[in-house]
Image (cartoon, grey):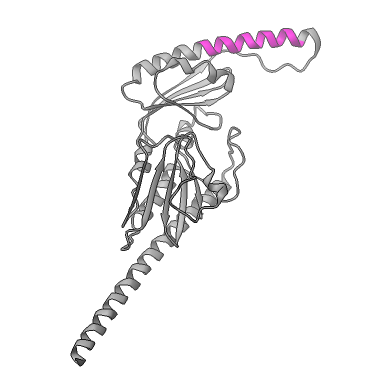
């Protein structure tokens, strides 16, 4: 009898030790993930260039470049739960989190929706992340298991895109093979008169001439976009549109591919890599 009790005690001690080891691993991975997020937040705050198209962000919302997201994914991939209760959920564009299985979400967050869809990653009683991707996820899904299902987020970073940054007088067309490679880019230029400050008839005449310049630029840009769309249609999965709304409206009939609105700063032809980085930037909310 005493021997049986001794064996049972030893088994319990081993079980407790394994549980403590699991908790230590989870805690360590979570701390690494928080450090990665904090580093990305500090880099974002220190950036001297802010996109004029991007609306003010709510408290707690962060912007993560593809490089920062890859670091975060590596840390999330190290987290494991023996209880198999890790939640990975991917929502289609426009769908809110109203019926999300994560019961701890505040009502205000459950009402969130995005035209690009969103992901909810949760380790119960430890943390929850809401991620809005730069491009829609390939499909919607919901899983619970020992580890996070992260492949949909990784696939977004590998998605080829035709980007049009449309601005009167100077626009850019870029084709990417994912977050790490620019296949091609070209700048489309046409003369457009600067804004006029005088009033009366002179101003009205100037505005008509400027509108005509913008229309010509729009037509020229559309021709170039149509050629790019025809050439790269078998390759790219989405068209991303950024820039001036009146120019963007003239482009929607140039292609049959699905289009998404990208809120990017004005492009710089001397630094197309910055535009590429902006294009594949994620929005993240952590709790």
Picture coordinates of residue 17, whole percent (x, y): 31, 76
**Res. 62 visible in picture:** no
Q: Is residue 207 magenta?
A: yes
Image point 33% across, 68% down: which residue? Answer: 22
Give the main secondary structure, helix, strand or loop, of the magenta stretch.
Answer: helix
Q: Residue furthest bottom?
A: 2
Is 39 or 130 nearer to us in this picture?
Answer: 130
Rendered position, 283 above or below 248: below
**Res. 66 visible in picture:** yes
Rendered position, 272 above or below 91: above
Picture coordinates of residue 199, whole percent (x, y): 80, 14
Is 4 or 90 nearer to us in this picture?
Answer: 4
Is 102 or 185 nearer to us in this picture?
Answer: 102
Q: Residue furthest right?
A: 200
Number of disc labels: 0
Picture coordinates of residue 279, whole percent (x, y): 46, 34
Q: Which residues are magenta?
A: 203-219
Q: Is residue 100 magenta?
A: no
Rendered position, 42 above or below 187: below
Image point 53% across, 50% down: which residue? Answer: 41
């Amino acid at each position: 009898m005493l021997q049986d009790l001794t064996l049972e005690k030893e088994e319990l001690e081993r079980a407790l030790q394994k549980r403590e080891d699991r908790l230590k691993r989870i805690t360590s991975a979570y701390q690494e993930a928080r450090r990665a997020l904090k580093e990305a937040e500090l880099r974002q705050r220190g950036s001297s260039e802010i996109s004029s198209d991007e609306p003010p962000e709510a408290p707690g919302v962060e912007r993560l470049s593809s490089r920062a997201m890859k670091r975060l994914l590596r840390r999330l991939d190290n987290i494991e739960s023996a209880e198999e209760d890790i939640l990975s959920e991917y929502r289609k564009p426009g769908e809110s989190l109203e019926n999300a299985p994560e019961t701890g979400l505040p009502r205000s967050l459950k009402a969130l929706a995005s035209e690009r869809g969103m992901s909810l990653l949760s380790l119960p009683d430890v943390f929850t992340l809401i991620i809005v991707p730069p491009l829609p996820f390939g499909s919607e899904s919901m899983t619970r298991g020992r580890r996070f299902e992260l492949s949909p987020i990784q696939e977004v970073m590998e998605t080829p895109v035709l980007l049009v940054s449309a601005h009167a007088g100077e626009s850019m067309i870029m084709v990417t093979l994912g977050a790490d490679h620019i296949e091609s880019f070209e700048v489309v230029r046409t003369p457009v008169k600067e804004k006029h400050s005088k009033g009366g008839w002179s101003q009205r005449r100037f505005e008509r001439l400027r509108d005509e310049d913008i229309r010509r630029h729009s037509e020229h840009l559309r021709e170039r976009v149509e050629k790019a769309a025809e050439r790269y249609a078998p390759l790219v999965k989405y068209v991303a549109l950024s820039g001036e709304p009146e120019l963007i409206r003239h482009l929607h009939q140039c292609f049959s591919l699905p289009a998404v609105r990208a809120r990017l700063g004005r492009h710089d032809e001397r630094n197309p890599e910055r535009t590429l980085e902006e294009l594949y930037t994620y929005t993240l909310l952590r709790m």
